[in-house]
Image (tube, helix red, strand yellow):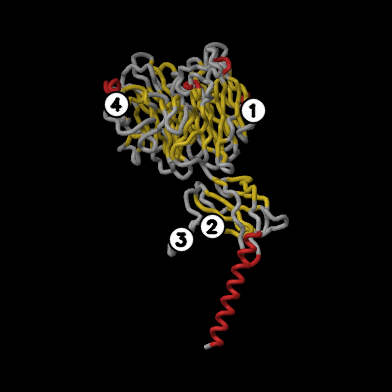
Amino acid sequence: MRAIALCLGVALVTLTARAVAREATAQALKSPTALAATSASRRAVALSWTPGDPGLTTFIVERKPLGASWTPPPPPAKSPIVSTPVSATTAADSAIDPFGTYVYRVRASGAAGALSAPSNEIVVGPPPVGFSQVVVAPAAMQDSSRFGLGLSLALDANSDPAIAYHIYDPNGDDNPEDTTLQFVSWNRAQYRWNAPVQVGVVGLIDTGTARKGLSLAFDASTNRFALAHMQGTREVRIAMSTDGVVWQDQVVDVPDEGSSAEPSLALAGGRVVLAYAIENSVRVRTGAQTDPPSKWTTETAPILPGMWRPRKTGISVAIDGTGKPAVAYWIDPDSGQNMALAIWRPGQSAPAKIADTADYQNDVLEARLAFSGTRAAAAFVARRDEKFFDGEHEIWFSSSADGGATWTPVVPLPADGGHGMGTPISLALDRQGHPALVAPFSHGNDSGARCGRPELIRSTDGVKWTTCAPGGKGTPTGSPDYAHVVFADNDKLYVAFTASSAGGALKAGLVLWRE
């Protein structure tokens, strides 16, 4: 018995000595510093750091989801912490959720399993869920409604958001010749928005159009952004960039007389499709993204029988899942008030009719076209009955299962109580063809309203609809406008908009909501 006790005592002394030695080694190890993500995509994150001890090359990279604790939960719960040993001062993590947000840190690893204190922590991933600030309107702008006058949203190769917008008359001298066009994109590696880039000075723009002449698109096959915009009220231009920093801005068209308006842009497979109003027609330009516009083909969208001329408003370009483009546009009748919304495939001889205005006069018209695979959907603002002036039956919806040849009967979309809706609207479809629309609060009151603003309208079958707001209660900022909606590749929504006044932590400027 005395021998057994002696052995146990020696073992305890040995274990205690090892623990003390390990603790001493850990205290002697210096923490790594300057941990940074050198790149980040939906597929992998690349990390680098500086060792606290020169020459040390053994480390443990630790990762956890944003919001999780570094303290592992007690068994049998699975720990969300991932620890990876590396023998370098760099590491690549490819075992990630494409839409996950992670926190990383690094420890030095010494003898007997000793670990140093952790390095600095970094966050990597897409923008935060919920509302967040994109850009704050400069405090020097006394009228913040000039900031973000018009907005267009697109998703990059990571399915992260990028936004184009105007700063109208930035110095406030009532001379809009200094109006600028801006671009801002999300940086996964640094978990923040990149500094806004000025694409150009565009001068006086037509403030009476719904989107103020902006249309942003991205082609994942070429990693190229394109931004259709107006230079003044006549010149149609397109700016292209592969990094969002350096832009090549080119003239597309300048009419000999009159004005141009409402450019709408789509990209796919290295091709560009651009439609815009010019005089009494809709002009459609298509070509390779690497070719100058002078080499693109030019077509004029045809009109329906018995109709007169296209309108300058509501032009919308979209590309289906097979890469074939389509253009939606309004056409005035030869006589009477029954305007028609048409869809046309470039190269075809005639358009198809989506809907009409039921013989009602309309001074303001709007339309958006979207595809999910070959299934098409159209949403539009028009007066089609007397409920229009009651703040009801303002936005209508129709869909097509055959690529736009035939369309379902139009249905009015519900308002949220007394929240009247106007232009501009935005439409997106997820991979199952479920639609989502956003629209501004343009008139009415809060009587009977259950939600905030902007108005977000959704359906899972195209028959039953709900109208509420992003996040249910809506934005805490004031006067959200120019809302634009897109579905990310995981079928979750992004909604971007401008806010002309502050609310809570959000200031006047550009705001993003992520589902």
Q: Earlier in the sequence, mark 4 or mark 1?
A: 1
- Residue 273: x %, y % from top left: 54, 30
Q: What residue is shown at x 60% (from left), y 54% (from top)?
A: 106
Q: Marks 2 and 4: in contact by CB < 8 Å?
A: no
- The answer to whether residue 490 is left or right of residue 94 is left
Residue beneath label 4, please? 418
The residues tagged by marks 4 and 1 sit, at their Cα atoms, a distance apart of 45 Å
Residue beneath label 3, please? 78
- Residue 84: x %, y % from top left: 59, 59
The residues tagged by marks 4 and 3 sit, at their Cα atoms, a distance apart of 49 Å
Q: In this view, does 309 lie above or below 129?
A: above
Q: In this view, does 260 lie above or below 101?
A: above
- Residue 320: x %, y % from top left: 48, 37
Which amino acid type is shown beneath numbered disc 4?
Answer: Gly
Q: Nearer the viewer, residue 359 or 232?
A: 232
Residue beneath label 2, please? 82
Q: Residue furthest top?
A: 257
Which amino acid type is shown beneath numbered disc 3?
Answer: Lys
Which amino acid type is shown beneath numbered disc 1?
Answer: Gln
Q: Is mark 3 on a helix, strand or loop?
A: loop
Question: Is residue 505 visible to the viewer in this orientation of the structure?
Answer: yes
Neighbor class of circle 1 (other Cα within 10 Å; few <14, some 14-19, many 20+) is few
Neighbor class of circle 2 (other Cα within 10 Å; few <14, some 14-19, many 20+) is few
Q: Earlier in the sequence, mark 2 or mark 1?
A: 2
- The answer to whether residue 223 is left or right of residue 129 is right
Q: Is mark 4 on a helix, strand or loop?
A: loop
Q: Earlier in the sequence, mark 1 or mark 3?
A: 3
